[in-house]
Image: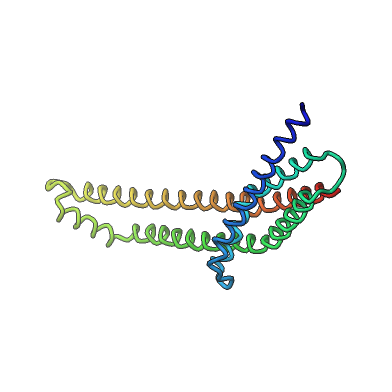
Amino acid sequence: MALSSSGRFSPLLRWIGITLVMLLLLQMLAVLGLWDWGSEAFRQLVVERLIQQAPMALVGLLLMYLSSRLDDDREERTPVLWAVCLLSGLLAVLLTASLPIAFGGDKLLQDQADQQLAAKRGQLEMARQQSKEPAVLQQLIKQAESAGQVPANATDAQKTQAARSFIDRQLQQMEDQFQQANQSSKVTLSQRRLAGSGGAVVLIVAFTLLCLGSVL
């Protein structure tokens, strides 16, 4: 009875596995159809899609491997096992070849984030320097008076204090925005390195083990 159940279950596993591998192929063909290898953005897109969809192919190949073992648990190398070996080996090679591009994308993203943060930091420092100039303070007071935001009977000290409080709030807002941008940049880079480049390394190991395990 157990052998009969395994025999019925095995083809289902095999076809589910083949379907998952085919989905990876279709996903990659959709991207490769836009072929422009000279573009850095296109190379990053190809590598990103490969890394994202490779786990699905890994599950598919594992299901194919299990289906073959259920069909025949002897040490014979069936055509399905050879297919699993070749496909997993090919994906391991492709992922290995994609690592330099993935690492390059990490560096490019880091450089862009550094430039953006440097620009925001420069704007913040410039605003701090300008806030110390008496002319800026007087201009704010005149604008507040013309807009009716300052009581008519307010003293010069009160006007100056109101303008200074406004400047401090603006500076604090800019500081908060800079800190948020810095934190968001760190999270984005960390996710890319762990889920992208780091994930590719883990997948290379998994595909290599599956490749060897299917024929040894």
Tell me residue 19's x, y (percent).
62, 48
Q: Residue furthest left?
A: 152
Tell me residue 112's x, y (percent).
52, 62
Q: Residue furthest top?
A: 1
Closer-to-camera residue (160/15): 15
Q: Residue furthest bottom?
A: 38
As displayed, is residue 114 above or below residue 54?
A: below
Tell me residue 192's x, y (percent).
58, 53
Q: Quadrant of residue 74?
A: top right
Colouring chosen for the image of the structure:
rainbow
Count up the numbered dots: 0
* Residue depicted at 14% across the width and 50% down the height: 148
Closer-to-camera residue (60/100): 60
Task: Locate the N terminus and report the quarter of the image it occupies.
Answer: top right
Q: Quadrant of residue 97?
A: bottom right
Closer-to-camera residue (114/43): 43
Tell me residue 173's x, y (percent).
37, 49
* Residue depicted at 59% across the width and 52% down the height: 23
* Residue depicted at 74% across the width and 33% down the height: 6
With 94 as the anchor, is 166 left or right in this view?
left
* Residue depicted at 70% across the width and 35% down the height: 9
Closer-to-camera residue (188/199): 199
With 59 as the anchor, is 86 left or right in this view?
right
